[in-house]
Image (cartoon, rainbow, N blue to C red):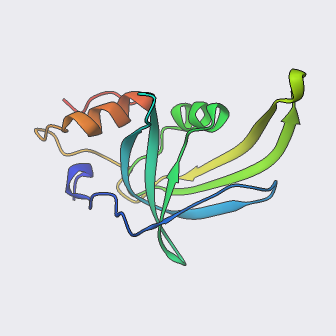
Amino acid sequence: MSVWDTPELQTNSDYIKFENAGDTVTGTVINISAHKWDDGSVSPQILLQTAEGQQTVTAGQVRLKAMLAERRPEVGDTLTITHTEVEKRAGGKTLKLWDVDIVRGADGGTIVAGEAPNAEQLAAMKLLGMAAPF
């Protein structure tokens, strides 16, 4: 199975909220796509198969987005995201900090040669720092 054979994000999947330090989710990556916000910005969106069912993580937080780009999760990988703490910033602002761990899938998350991603998949790959599979 290639990355592009994976199911699309489900509108009925549960969206993960990381509200408190220690909140965590672990699951197998089913799909990676891009989520476009109302202001035009784009964030990676990852559909996970967890023990609780399908759950979606939208990485809008700047540090989480950066860590996902660095770690480059792929379909088939087991991904664990943990919200570790909130750093207080000047002006009363805060910054969430994260741990992101990946166990590579059995197939190494390989993409079958000759299959072209669509525009949404290319945008998600760019956000995660992945090269196009062609």
Q: Looking at the picture, how far across and down is residue 71, in whole percent? A: 55, 37
Query: Depth check: 36 or 47 in front?
Result: 36
Outermost residue to the left: 114
Outermost residue to the front: 38
Left or right: where 62 falls relative to 33: right
Left or right: where 101 falls relative to 73: right
Residue 110 visible in image = yes
Q: Residue at x 22, y 33 (%)?
A: 119
Outermost residue to the bottom: 52
Query: Depth check: 9 or 72 in front?
Result: 9
Q: Looking at the picture, how far across and down is residue 113, in whole percent? A: 15, 40
Quadrant of the image containing the C terminus: top left
Q: Residue at x 54, y 77 (%)?
A: 51
Q: Residue at x 57, y 50 (%)?
A: 102
Picture quadrant of residue 12: bottom left
Residue 128 visible in image = no
Q: Looking at the picture, how far across and down is residue 53, in whole percent? A: 47, 76
Quadrant of the image containing the N terminus: bottom left
Left or right: where 27 falls relative to 9: right
* Vertical order, 76 against 131 (above or below): below
Q: Residue at x 34, y 55 (%)?
A: 107
* Vertical order, 56 against 94 (above or below): below
Query: Depth check: 111 or 52 in front?
Result: 52
Q: Looking at the picture, how far across and down is residue 91, in whole percent? A: 88, 22
Query: Depth check: 45 or 92 in front?
Result: 92
